[in-house]
Amino acid sequence: MMGDAINIMDIDTVGLDLRDPSVVIIDQTKLPGEIVLKKLRSPQEVWEAIRRLEVRGAPAIGVSAAMGLYVIASDLAGQYEADEEGFFAEVKKQSDYLNSSRPTAVNLSWALHRMEEKLLSMAGKSRKEQVEALCTEALEIRDEDIRVCRQIGENGLKLIKDGAGILTHCNAGKLAAVRYGTATAPIYLAKEKGWNLRVYCDETRPLLQGARLTSFELFSSGIDTTLLCDNMSASLMKEGAVDAVFVGCDRVAANGDAANKIGTSVVATVAARYGVPVYIAAPTSTIDMATPTGDDIIIEQRDGSEVTDMWYEKPMAPAGIKVYNPAFDVTDHELIAGIVTEFGVARAPYDESLKEIFEKKKEITGRLS
Ligand code: MRU
């Protein structure tokens, strides 16, 4: 456990300890009360940390899984010194296992797929070289996340002005990535420029990512932060306090429909009523061109006790009540003013503009996904 003097902004959300191969995460279930760093070594520990939301947010899940797969592979390598086929099969099995921890955020399968491809490209090399290559790839996925989030910040900053009021839902902040976050990146960059933004954080029922995480990290950074319950955003927008909504996402479909934390589509619907633009901050690792529309996105369903019992001393609903608890909803592309990526802002029609974003990505990085 770390002392109170530590600022959450000074620690990466996910890191790798190379001396004692392990993934080091900030345990987000303990925030904002305590800043606790947790080490993950076994496949089960990585899986559980993602499933229990100790590490959460699409980019952070991807980085943790990639680092986790490296740690698992380094542990397995000794047993498979003379058996490359067995080693590759076991790493693939563990990758599939990690991928089963949460279904909606595409960054998870994206990062694991990159790790698998890297290993395949090292066929014929020694186990040591293969494990080193996995380590380098995991660190590159982390470094890329930092660069990409900063670039999303630069692109998002062009959409707002000094003094603006921004509403956000859930946590697409540094705690959902490695640094900067996605939806919060323009806010942190505005702060660096000396701008004064007013940021409104929806508390985000039932798991309170907005209250526990977003308001905590923004407030810790000295940003003008106001917390509100999810059912208060309409009156805030009606008062004219909100100039733009910035949210993150877990998967963007090829037509621009975007899955994000449950309640995002409510915010977007209300924003349309009051003429407030809704921007989805999305690294290209979150855009899934193989998923045609939002209807094709698998939505994680979570335990009803998160609604009835969590955070309360006693259950706040009758025992045995049926509970509807999807973790995400899909915001229709018609409600989205722009999808802010590291390669620019995609605008409607998204089936064309998202393709252009990937063409630009290929031109600049040589990568297709
Ligand atoms: O269930 P969570 O906390 O992992 O949900 C996170 C979100 O919905 C975020 O907005 C999304 O992953 C984007 S993070 C940059």
Image (cartoon, helix red, strand yellow):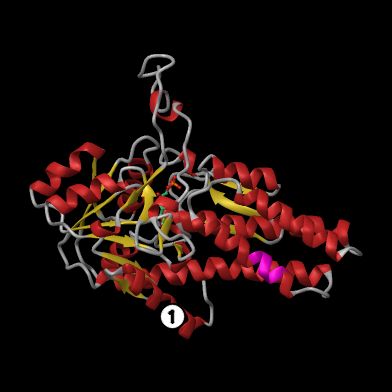
Amino acid type for the residue under numbered disc 1: Glu
Residue 3 can be seen in this image? yes
Q: Which residue is mark 1?
A: 359
Q: Is residue 324 above or below residue 65?
A: above
Residue 13 can be seen in this image? no
Q: Residues within 10 Å of mark 1 (few under 14, many from 20)?
A: some
**Which residue corresponds to the image point at 68% horizontal and 71% vertical from the top-left?**
118
**Which residue corresponds to the image point at 35% horizontal and 43% vertical from the top-left?**
262
Residue 322 location in percent, x, y? 41, 22
Location of residue 158 (image quadrant)? bottom left
Residue furthest to the right: 82
Left or right, 268 with respect to 239, comes to right
For the residue pair 335 and 40, the one nearer the viewer reads as 335
For the residue pair 290 and 214, the one nearer the viewer reads as 290
Location of residue 63 (image quadrant)? bottom right
For the N terminus, give its image quadrant: top right
Residue 153 location in percent, x, y? 33, 68
**Which residue corresponds to the image point at 59% horizontal and 53% vertical from the top-left?**
24
Residue 230 location in percent, x, y? 25, 39
Q: Is residue 201 above or below residue 129?
A: above
**Which residue corresponds to the image point at 14% horizontal and 45% vertical from the top-left?**
236
What is the chief secondary structure element of the magenta stretch?
helix
Q: Which residues are magenta?
A: 115-119
Residue 153 counted in the magenta span: no
Left or right, 264 with respect to 292, comes to left
Q: Is residue 85 above or below residue 123?
A: above
Residue furthest to the left: 239
Residue 301 location in percent, x, y? 47, 37
